[in-house]
Image: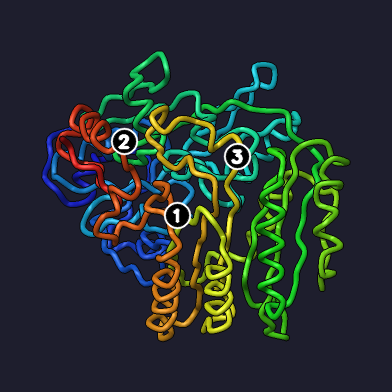
């Protein structure tokens, strides 16, 4: 095959062949491959380079650097803040790269960047092992890990990035290097929270922990009319949770013909099943719930529990805030927002953050989100393009109404590049060090995702 540059229609010196699939705007599948999870975002990349191996990624980066095309990286393709979008740039699509190797004896896993969490969990659970990653199993491992990586195991074992042992990186100059504590340690520090600002992570290595295969978990559901009492109960229960447990509250429209507004509490306890039953017993008796699906379940089912709430076909616009306290006024604001939501597909997700993730010093990694509290995701979802304006407006108005209760911090995966101070919100006291490392590894700012760290 000719070089990738020639395939795009650019004049370039001879280069190694590109064995992947290159999709230009004239290609039939280009629109499907350029699509991002945020429905209102319409970007027109110069091309999408679907890479089959590391050599393909190196060639894609070489061509992007030669013609000064911004690079956006697509891994599992589920990011709700459009990290995989670029206008007139190059999307490096890693989704075909999905090999996984689990070393059960050493409790390590190595996975290529196109892997999704449910795929990694499926392999590691064959050995009764897992690592932190993903509330929703179809999320890609790479983007979530490099930006932070919340998940059901974070109270026990920290964020996904806290369990990252090493990553193979393709840098802006085309070099392939290993970032780890003993190799390029400055780069290793930066990618753990700095996202895709420093290169393309093509493979990641994780520490594994004994988990499952059976755990206690599930969901209980209440009518929205009881929302104030339910979310107060949620708040109080979260305050006494052990590290083995995590709770997530969801305000949404019931997925049946009733169109009733509901408040659900989802839980996962990844210690011994009987301990989990005891911890979650109050969830089954409070109310009592209209629906009770809480009990013993496989760990691999935990990260698929919320998947139906985020259909890939939907047009989506998400906003986030982090609340250090879920006070009554904030609860009332959330309930009112749910009540006036224009789409039955939309929801508000409240993730409780506590335990091991909060005990890591802010300077230990580039991730500054080490606060205990509640991460609130406002997920507006709809199908009809003509409904975009009012559904985007609902998400933005809801997020604005939560601003008085919010902390001035968000994780890299949740920071919105449209915010004027998004970089400071995402990286805080670590920003200056990140800018210096950016200048070393990507001085030309080839990798400029939506929350872009500029070289010092």
Residue 265 quadrant: bottom right
Closest to the observer: 326 or 200? 326
Q: Position of residue 252 (x, y in %)?
A: 62, 73
Closer to the eye: label 2 or 3: 2
Secondary structure at badge 3 equals helix
Closest to the observer: 447 or 148? 148
Q: Which residue is mark 2?
A: 430
Closer to the eye: label 2 or 1: 2
Residue visible at 72% across and 76% down?
Answer: 226
Closest to the observer: 148 or 66? 148
Q: Position of residue 289 (x, y in %)?
A: 81, 69
Marks 2 & 3, CB-CB < 8 Å contact: no
Q: Position of residue 50 (x, y in %)?
A: 38, 47
Closer to the eye: label 1 or 3: 3
Label located before the other in sequence (2 or 1): 1
User: Mark 1 Cα within 10 Å, few/some/many (few <14, many 20+)?
Assistant: many
Query: Is residue 152 visible from the viewing direction of this image?
Result: yes
Query: Is residue 17 visible from the viewing direction of this image?
Result: no
Q: Which residue is mark 3?
A: 154
Q: Is residue 272 left or right of 364 when viewed as pictured?
A: right
Instruction: Give the Cα separation between the discs numbered 1 and 3.
Output: 19 Å
Secondary structure at badge 1 equals loop
Q: Quadrant of the C terminus?
A: top left
Marks 1 & 3, CB-CB < 8 Å contact: no
Q: Which residue is mark 1?
A: 79
Q: Position of residue 207 (x, y in %)?
A: 59, 25
Secondary structure at badge 2 equals helix
């Amino acid at each position: 095959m000719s070089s990738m540059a020639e395939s795009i229609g650019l004049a370039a010196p001879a280069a190694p062949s590109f064995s992947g699939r290159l999709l230009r705007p004239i290609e039939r599948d280009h629109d499907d491959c350029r699509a991002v999870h945020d429905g209102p975002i319409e970007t027109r990349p110069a091309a999408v380079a679907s890479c089959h191996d590391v050599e393909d990624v190196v060639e894609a980066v070489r061509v992007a650097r030669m013609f000064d095309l911004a690079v956006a990286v697509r891994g599992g393709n589920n990011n709700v803040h459009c990290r995989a979008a670029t206008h007139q740039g190059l999307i490096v699509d890693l989704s075909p790269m999905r090999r996984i190797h689990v070393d059960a004896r050493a409790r390590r896993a190595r996975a290529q960047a196109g892997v999704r969490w449910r795929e990694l969990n499926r392999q590691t659970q064959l050995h009764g092992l897992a690592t932190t990653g993903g509330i929703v199993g179809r999320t890609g491992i790479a983007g979530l890990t490099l930006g932070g990586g919340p998940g059901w195991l974070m109270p026990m074992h920290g964020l996904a990035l806290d369990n990252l042992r090493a990553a193979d990186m393709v840098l802006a100059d085309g070099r392939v290097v290993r970032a780890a504590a003993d190799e390029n340690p400055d780069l290793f520090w930066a990618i753990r929270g700095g996202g895709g600002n420093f290169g393309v992570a093509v493979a990641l290595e994780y520490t594994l922990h004994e988990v499952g295969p059976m755990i206690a978990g599930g969901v209980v559901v209440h009518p929205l009319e009881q929302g104030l009492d339910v979310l107060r109960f949620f708040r109080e229960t979260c305050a006494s949770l052990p590290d083995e447990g995590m709770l997530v509250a969801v305000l949404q429209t019931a997925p049946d013909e009733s169109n009733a507004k509901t408040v659900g509490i989802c839980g996962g306890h990844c210690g011994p099943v009987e301990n989990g039953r005891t911890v979650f017993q109050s969830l089954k008796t409070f109310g009592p719930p209209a629906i009770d699906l809480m009990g013993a379940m496989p760990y691999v089912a935990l990260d698929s529990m919320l998947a139906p709430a985020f259909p890939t076909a939907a047009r989506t616009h998400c906003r986030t805030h982090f609340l250090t306290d879920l006070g009554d006024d904030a609860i009332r604001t959330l309930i009112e927002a749910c009540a006036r939501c224009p789409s039955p597909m939309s929801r508000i997700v409240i993730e409780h953050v506590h335990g091991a993730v909060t005990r890591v010093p802010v300077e230990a990694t580039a991730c500054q989100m080490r606060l205990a509290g509640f991460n609130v995701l406002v997920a507006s979802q709809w199908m009809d393009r003509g409904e975009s304006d009012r559904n985007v407006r609902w998400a933005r108005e809801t997020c604005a109404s939560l601003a008085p209760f919010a902390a001035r911090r968000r994780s890299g995966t949740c920071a919105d590049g449209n915010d004027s101070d998004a970089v400071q919100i995402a990286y805080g006291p670590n920003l200056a060090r990140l800018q210096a490392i950016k200048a070393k590894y990507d001085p030309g700012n080839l990798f400029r995702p939506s929350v872009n760290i500029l070289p010092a």
